[in-house]
C-alpha cells in the first residue's frame, strides 16, 4: 500500500495544485522599501494599485501592455517555481515568461541563476558534451614493456568458445588473441600468464578497463607477484584504451569477411595476416618488429636469399637492429572539436553523463557529485563514499545555490484568497496574519470509505491499499 503500491492508478498519484496567495504579497508590499524606491525614482515604470477581494492593494506596473505585479524578495523564488516547474523551459524562455508576468529589480539575473541551478533540468537536459584534447600515452622505450588487455564477447559459440582475451604490445603492435569459454577472473588471469608472460616475459605496465575480471583480487595479486604496474582506464570511456579497441574493430571486420560461422577456425588465419601486413608508419610488419625478419605466408613462391653468418654475428646484428627500432606512431586521422566548459575548473560539484543503455525516461546525467581532485583528463569524484576517477569527457559542471538562497519551493503554496468568496476574506486574512512566520502546505482530508454490508449482513472489508490517499 501507499508508496509501495507500484501498480496504483493515476488518481492515487495526483499532485496538489494550489495558487499563490496574493494577499500575502500585497501585505508585504505595504512596507517594502524596494517598492517605495522604485515608485519614486524609476521614471520608466508606472505603478498602479489594484484592490483585491480582501480589500488589500496590490501594486502593479502598467507601463506595458501586461499588468505585472511587483514581487517582494521573499516570494520571488516561489513565483519562479510556479512558472518554471510547469515544463522546465530553458533560461531564455523562462526569463521571457517571468519578465512578462512579474517585476522586481534584477529579475533577469535572478531567473537566469535559478534556471541554471534547476536540478531537474541539469540531470535530464543533454547539453554540449565536453571534448578534451586526445591524450598521449607515454611511449614505451622497449618491446613488450607496455601491454593493453581486454575482453571481447559474448560471441556466437564456436567449438565451445564464446569470448576472446585480446592482448597487444604498445611498441610493436604484436597481438595475441585467445578464445576462452568463460570470463571468470581465474580464466582471464591464467590466459594472460600462459599466453603472454610465458612467451614475452613480464611487462612493466599493463593497461585495462574497469572490467570486474581485472578488478578482482586474483588478477591484482597476479600482477603484484609478477611486478607489473596495473593501470586502469576511466569508466565508460573506451578512448582511453583506444589501442586495443582499434584491434577489436579490425579483428571483427576480418573475421566477418570470411563468411564463416566457425570463427575459431578463421581466427589463426586472420592473426597471421595482421602480423605479416606491412605497416606504412613503421616501414615494417609487426612480425619484423617482433622477430627481426618477415614471416613466410602461404602463397610465397621464392625463399629469401640466405646469408651465411655465424650465430654470434647474427645475434649482435639483431641486437643493433632492435635497438634502432622505434615504437609505432599513433596518427589521429580526424580533427576533434575541442570543448571544455570554463566552469569545470571552478565548480565544486559535477554531473556525470550516463553512457550505458538507459531505460525510457531515465535521466541523462547522474549526480551531482563532489569533486575531490582535478586533473587534465579526468576528475576524482566522491561517488557512494568512494573516490572514483571519471573522464572529463563525461562531466558537466553542476550549479548549486547556496543554502540560504534555496528556500523550499512549496512553502508559500497556500490556497489563494482570489479563489474564495468575498465574505470569507476577513477570516482568511486573520489566519494569514497569525500564521505568516510558519506557513505550511495544507494537508488533503482523508476520504472515509463508507461501510458496506452484503445481503447476508457480512461487513465488506476493502484492501488497505485502497483506503489511503497518495499525495
Image: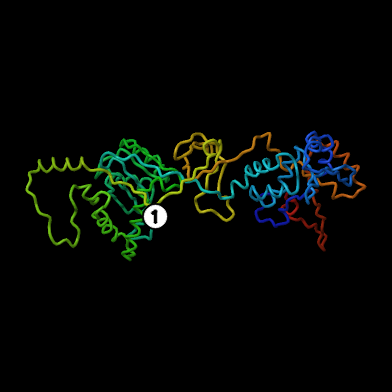
In the shown orientation, is residue 310 left or right of residue 59?
left
Residue at 31% across, 47% down: 168
Residue 159: x and y in percent read: 32, 60
Residue 36: x and y in percent read: 81, 35
**Nearer the observer, 459 or 100:** 100
Residue 316: x and y in percent read: 13, 40
Residue at 90% across, 43% down: 55
Name the quadrant containing residue 41: top right
Name the quadrant containing residue 234: top left
From this viewpoint, which residue is outermost toward the right? 423
The residue wearing badge 1 is: 153
Q: Is residue 18 above or below residue 42?
A: below
**Nearer the observer, 335 or 39:** 39
Q: Residues within 10 Å of mark 1 (few under 14, many from 20)?
A: some
SS class of the residue under badge 1?
loop
**Nearer the observer, 374 or 266:** 374
Residue 272: x and y in percent read: 25, 56
In the shown orientation, is residue 290 left or right of residue 259?
left
From this viewpoint, which residue is outermost toward the front? 43
In the shown orientation, is residue 341 left or right of residue 144?
right
Amino acid at each position: 500500500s501507499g508508496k509501495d503500491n507500484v501498480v496504483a492508478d493515476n488518481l492515487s498519484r495526483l499532485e496538489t495544485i494550489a495558487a499563490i496567495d496574493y494577499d500575502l504579497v500585497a501585505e508585504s508590499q505595504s512596507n517594502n522599501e524596494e517598492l517605495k524606491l522604485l515608485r519614486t525614482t524609476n521614471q520608466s515604470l508606472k505603478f498602479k494599485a489594484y484592490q483585491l477581494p480582501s480589500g488589500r492593494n496590490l501594486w502593479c506596473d502598467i507601463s506595458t501592455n501586461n499588468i505585472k505585479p511587483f514581487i517582494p524578495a521573499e516570494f520571488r523564488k516561489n513565483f519562479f517555481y510556479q512558472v518554471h516547474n510547469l515544463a522546465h523551459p530553458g533560461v531564455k524562455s523562462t526569463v521571457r515568461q517571468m519578465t512578462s508576468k512579474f517585476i522586481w529589480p534584477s529579475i533577469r539575473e535572478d531567473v537566469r541563476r535559478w534556471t541554471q541551478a534547476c536540478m531537474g533540468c541539469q540531470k535530464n537536459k543533454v547539453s554540449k558534451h565536453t571534448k578534451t584534447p586526445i591524450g598521449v600515452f607515454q611511449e614505451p622505450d622497449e618491446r613488450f614493456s607496455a601491454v593493453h588487455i581486454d575482453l571481447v564477447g559474448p560471441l556466437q559459440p564456436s567449438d565451445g568458445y564464446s569470448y576472446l582475451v585480446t592482448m597487444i604490445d604498445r611498441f610493436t603492435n604484436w597481438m595475441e588473441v585467445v578464445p576462452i569459454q568463460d570470463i571468470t577472473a581465474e580464466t582471464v588471469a591464467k590466459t594472460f600468464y600462459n599466453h603472454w608472460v610465458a612467451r614475452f616475459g613480464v611487462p612493466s605496465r599493463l593497461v585495462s578497463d574497469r572490467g570486474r575480471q581485472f578488478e578482482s583480487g586474483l588478477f591484482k595479486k597476479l600482477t603484484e607477484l609478477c611486478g607489473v604496474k596495473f593501470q586502469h582506464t576511466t569508466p565508460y570511456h573506451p578512448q582511453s584504451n583506444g589501442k586495443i579497441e582499434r584491434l577489436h574493430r579490425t579483428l571483427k571486420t576480418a573475421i566477418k569477411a570470411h563468411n564463416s560461422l566457425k570463427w575459431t577456425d578463421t581466427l589463426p588465419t586472420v592473426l597471421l595476416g595482421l602480423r605479416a601486413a606491412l605497416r606504412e608508419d613503421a616501414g615494417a610488419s609487426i612480425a619484423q618488429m617482433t622477430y627481426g625478419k618477415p614471416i613466410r605466408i602461404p602463397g610465397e613462391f621464392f625463399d629469401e636469399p640466405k646469408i651465411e653468418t655465424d650465430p654470434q654475428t647474427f645475434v649482435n646484428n639483431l641486437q643493433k637492429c632492435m635497438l634502432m627500432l622505434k615504437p609505432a606512431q599513433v596518427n589521429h586521422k580526424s580533427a576533434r572539436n575541442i570543448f571544455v566548459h570554463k566552469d569545470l575548473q571552478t565548480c565544486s560539484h559535477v554531473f556525470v553523463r550516463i553512457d550505458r543503455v538507459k531505460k525510457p525516461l531515465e535521466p541523462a546525467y547522474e549526480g551531482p557529485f563532489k569533486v575531490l581532485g582535478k586533473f587534465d583528463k579526468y576528475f576524482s569524484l566522491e561517488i557512494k563514499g568512494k573516490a572514483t576517477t571519471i573522464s572529463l569527457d563525461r562531466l558537466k559542471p553542476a550549479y548549486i545555490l547556496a543554502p540560504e538562497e534555496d528556500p523550499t519551493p512549496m512553502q508559500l503554496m497556500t490556497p489563494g484568497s482570489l479563489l474564495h468568496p468575498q465574505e470569507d476574506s476577513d477570516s482568511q486574512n486573520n489566519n494569514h496574519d497569525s500564521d505568516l512566520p510558519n506557513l505550511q502546505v495544507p494537508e488533503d482530508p482523508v476520504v472515509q470509505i463508507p461501510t458496506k454490508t452484503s445481503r447476508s449482513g457480512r461487513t465488506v472489508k476493502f484492501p488497505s491499499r485502497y483506503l489511503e490517499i497518495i499525495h
